[in-house]
Image (cartoon, grey):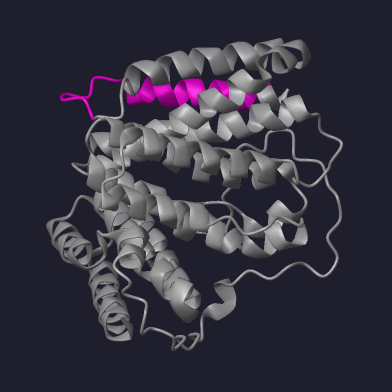
């Protein structure tokens, strides 16, 4: 396993250097920024057994995101090779017992500054009025969540949980449609994408570890459990996420507005993923967006009346955006052709953010 990881890092290094040489256009520079950031996370996270799994899983994510944004042949070729190494994801590796002899932790790299540590003195702060975009330059997890902020901001904290829920809902529905491979990967991805980085935050909030639920369900999919069994496992994961949400940091913001901003964040992610899916052949890109849409709707419906009572304009904007997303993501299976209007989705997502900022 360590040999595979070393080869993976070496290949990624070589590829990113080539991209640096060729990346002159703005979209290529964006891809470069994401790629280098992911590689830094790979190196910083490759510690111990779980860290190595996270690193391998994130490598596949980085390659697929690279391919979706830049659309270059050499990126696609690199993605194909990485997928050969990592497409089984965390669940498969765990199911096959590949970690049985892997007890030697990887030495942290010099750029391990990407690891998240708890602030010395966390103070309660209310979420910014328009804070629905949760990614920033510092302390950001692979899923685009500002981990440091999750200690004090319930929107960021709950958005991290919503990202995990999005993958689970997408996985459940993909499994129901017969997409076993994609479903198994989706169940495993939240561990590497956000939960691994959120571990110290959960510990600070007194939340017990629940990540085994994800890897166990991923393994169960590969083991051939029935749809009813997988759905029951999914319900347990969602219940664990809802339980963890109860330990979100307290602020002066109302529960309704926190839920509205989390829904807005998921809407924004679903809109972005649809745009990327139009430019990519990867099923995972569409499935990610489908999950974000499902979680946005779930979050909003649970607090719809309270949101409408406090901010009717925001509630209406969210409803309008969800209606567009429902047309764009009709099922967990990617439509062919995809006929949604990415520009309309982006405008609707922006209108939600604007309504919440007022």
User: Relative to 168, does residue 340 appear above or below in the rendering?
Assistant: above
User: Relative to 334, does residue 64 appear above or below in the rendering?
Assistant: below
Residue 337 counted in the magenta span: yes
Q: Is residue 172 left or right of residue 334?
A: right
User: Relative to 219, does residue 305 appear above or below in the rendering?
Assistant: above
Number of labels in the image equals 0
The quarter of the picture where residue 216 lies is bottom left
Which range is magenta?
Answer: 334-355
Q: Which residue is drawn at 52% across and 51% down?
A: 144
Q: How far across and down, in percent of the image, does residue 89 sit?
A: 32, 60
The answer, for residue 189, to whether it is visible in the render is: no
Q: Which of 120 and 218 is in front in this view?
A: 218
Q: Is residue 341 left or right of residue 165?
A: left
Q: Is residue 5 left or right of residue 147?
A: left
Q: How far across and down, in percent of the image, does residue 223 sit?
A: 28, 52
The answer, for residue 165, to whether it is visible in the render is: yes
Q: How far across and down, in percent of the image, does residue 350 sit?
A: 53, 26
The quarter of the picture where residue 287 lies is top left
Q: Which residue is drawn at 47% across and 69% down?
A: 41
Quadrant where the N terminus lies? bottom left
Q: Which residue is drawn at 31% across and 42% down?
A: 285
Q: Residue at x 76, y 61 (%)?
A: 204
Residue 351 counted in the magenta span: yes
The quarter of the picture where residue 230 lies is top left
Magenta: main secondary structure: helix
Q: Is residue 307 left or right of residue 26?
A: right
Q: Nearer the viewer, residue 115 or 235?
A: 235
Quadrant where the C terminus lies? top right
User: Relative to 331, does residue 20 appear above or below in the rendering?
Assistant: below
């Amino acid at each position: 396993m360590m040999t595979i990881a070393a080869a993976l890092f070496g290949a990624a290094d070589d590829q990113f250097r080539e991209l640096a040489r060729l990346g002159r256009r703005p979209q290529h520079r964006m891809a470069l920024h994401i790629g280098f950031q992911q590689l830094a996370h790979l190196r910083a996270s490759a510690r111990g057994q779980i860290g190595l799994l996270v690193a391998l899983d994130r490598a596949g994510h980085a390659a697929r995101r690279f391919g979706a944004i830049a659309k270059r042949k050499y990126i696609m070729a690199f993605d194909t090779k990485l997928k050969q190494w990592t497409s089984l994801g965390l669940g498969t590796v765990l199911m096959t017992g590949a970690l049985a002899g892997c007890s030697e932790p990887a030495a942290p790299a010099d750029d391990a500054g990407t690891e998240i540590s708890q602030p010395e003195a966390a103070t309660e702060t209310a979420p910014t009025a328009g804070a629905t975009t949760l990614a920033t330059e510092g302390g950001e997890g692979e899923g685009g969540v500002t981990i440091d902020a999750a200690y004090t901001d319930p929107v960021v904290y709950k958005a991290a949980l919503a990202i995990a829920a999005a993958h689970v809902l997408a996985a459940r529905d993909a499994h129901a449609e017969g997409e076993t491979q994609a479903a198994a990967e989706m169940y495993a991805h939240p561990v590497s994408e956000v939960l691994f980085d959120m571990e110290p935050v959960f510990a600070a909030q007194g939340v017990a570890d629940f990540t085994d639920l994800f890897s166990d369900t991923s393994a169960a999919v590969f083991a051939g459990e029935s749809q009813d069994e997988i759905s029951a496992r999914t319900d347990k994961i969602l219940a664990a996420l809802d339980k963890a949400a109860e330990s979100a940091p307290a602020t002066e913001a109302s529960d309704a507005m926190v839920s509205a901003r989390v829904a807005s964040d998921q809407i924004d992610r679903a809109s972005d993923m649809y745009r990327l899916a139009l430019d990519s052949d990867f099923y995972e890109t569409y499935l990610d967006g489908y999950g974000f849409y499902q979680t946005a709707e779930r979050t909003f419906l649970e607090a719809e009346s309270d949101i409408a009572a406090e901010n009717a304009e925001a509630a209406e904007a969210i409803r309008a955006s969800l209606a567009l997303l429902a047309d764009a993501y009709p099922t967990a299976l990617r439509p062919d052709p995809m006929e949604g209007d990415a520009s309309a989705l982006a405008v609707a997502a922006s209108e939600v953010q604007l309504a919440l900022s007022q």
